[in-house]
Image (spheres, rainbow, N blue to C red):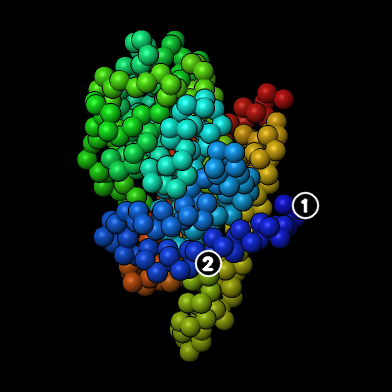
Amino acid sequence: MTQFDLTDDQRQIQEMAQKFTADAITPNAALWDEKHIFPRDTIRAAAALGFGSIYVSEESGGIGLGRLEAALIMEAMAYGCPSTSAFISIHNMASWMIDRFGAAAVKQKYLPSMITMERMGSYCLTEPGSGSDAAALTTRAVRDGDDYIVSGSKAFISGGGENEVYVTMVRTGEDGPKGISCLVIEKDMKGVSFGAQEKKLGWHSQPTAQVNLDEVRVPAENLVGPEGDGFRIAMMGLDGGRLNIGACSLGGAQRCLDESIAYTKERKQFSNPIADFQATQFTLADMETELQAARMLLYVAAAKVTANAPDKTRFAAMAKRLATDTGSQVVDRALQLHGGYGYLQDYPIERFWRDLRVHSILEGTNQIMRVIVARDLLRQ
């Protein structure tokens, strides 16, 4: 990124993702939502473009792009379906963690099939008893020869029951963050089971379930990073995940703004298009202004994460908070501009309203984002 604009290469990546979305995602997203269809074939088609390994290194077979390029791809795909875009984001987070911190054996075992999304990856941190207090997790892994024996449960796992690979934070040592390690667990390992699919407000195109681990024997070579580094690895993964989920909010909100501009030009009341009314114009102007402000902060934060800047985590938290809050506010105003029609499933607005609502909860709630920002400010 140049100081205030995208480079030619970044624009080409953005346009490729936009074209894929227009061809493969947008025409199908309403049906996926209505029928709760998990679009494996479309997701694998995205992987064929490199979107399953956006910031996996080229040495490992990925396309080795930065976090801004990843955000551009997620934003473009969310214009069609935030749920599907977010699923692909989570897979990228899991594959990046293996590539960035894993030893050669675990990388060779998993990355080739994850890059093509033949095998899809989940990120497993949250538990029924530890959400925002992630360092209080209780899933335990006990070393037994060349294996770990793992028992516990993970909650709200995207891809749960469907994905083949689960990058899982487990407790191998003392209480608190320093006792947490990261293991790769496979769906078919003995002792792995899943809860019922969650019945969600939105995100209907991706499965979500609890992951249950009952004395699962996991090879020690599946350890990602050293013992005790799991929490640090998980948090580094979340810096990128927060950017991507913010980008998904931007893409969904942009779609709803575009739909609103078109609708208000066509919809007539009092013998005039409602776009002629100053109240409508002011609403559209505020939607555009706030969306652009959130986008600029997110792009700057993405550049900082790529550069490993000292304030990258604070900027990622600020960008996630602003983009997800703004996205939901923009979509809510889009629904209001559509009036009663916005409440109907015949129009896409209500789907985006439902899908974007969870973005202020996952990858760290927006209240925790404020905690991260405040702590960093007060530490200075």
User: In this rendering, is residue 272 above or below 20?
Assistant: below
Q: Amino acid at mark 1?
A: Gln
Callout in the foreground (1, 2) = 2
On the rendered image, what quadrant is the C terminus found in? top right
Percent position (x, y) of residue 377?
67, 30
Circle on res. 3: 1
Percent position (x, y) of residue 118?
38, 46
For the point 33% across and 69% down, the residue is: 344
User: Real-space Cα distance between discs 1 and 2?
Assistant: 26 Å
For the point 67% across and 26% down, the residue is: 378
Q: Earlier in the sequence, mark 1 or mark 2?
A: 1
Q: Nearer the viewer, residue 314 or 82?
A: 82
Q: Nearer the viewer, residue 20 or 202?
A: 20
Q: Amino acid at mark 2?
A: Lys
Q: Where is mark 2, residue-wise?
A: 19
User: In this rendering, is residue 274 above or below 203?
Assistant: below
Q: Is residue 35 left or right of residue 321?
A: left
Percent position (x, y) of residue 128?
32, 29
Query: Which corner quadrant of the image does residue 160 belong to?
Result: top left
SS at badge 1: loop
Whether residue 178 is visible to the viewer of this picture, yes or no, is yes
User: In this rendering, is residue 337 above or below 360?
Assistant: below
Query: Which corner quadrant of the image does residue 283 belong to?
Result: bottom right
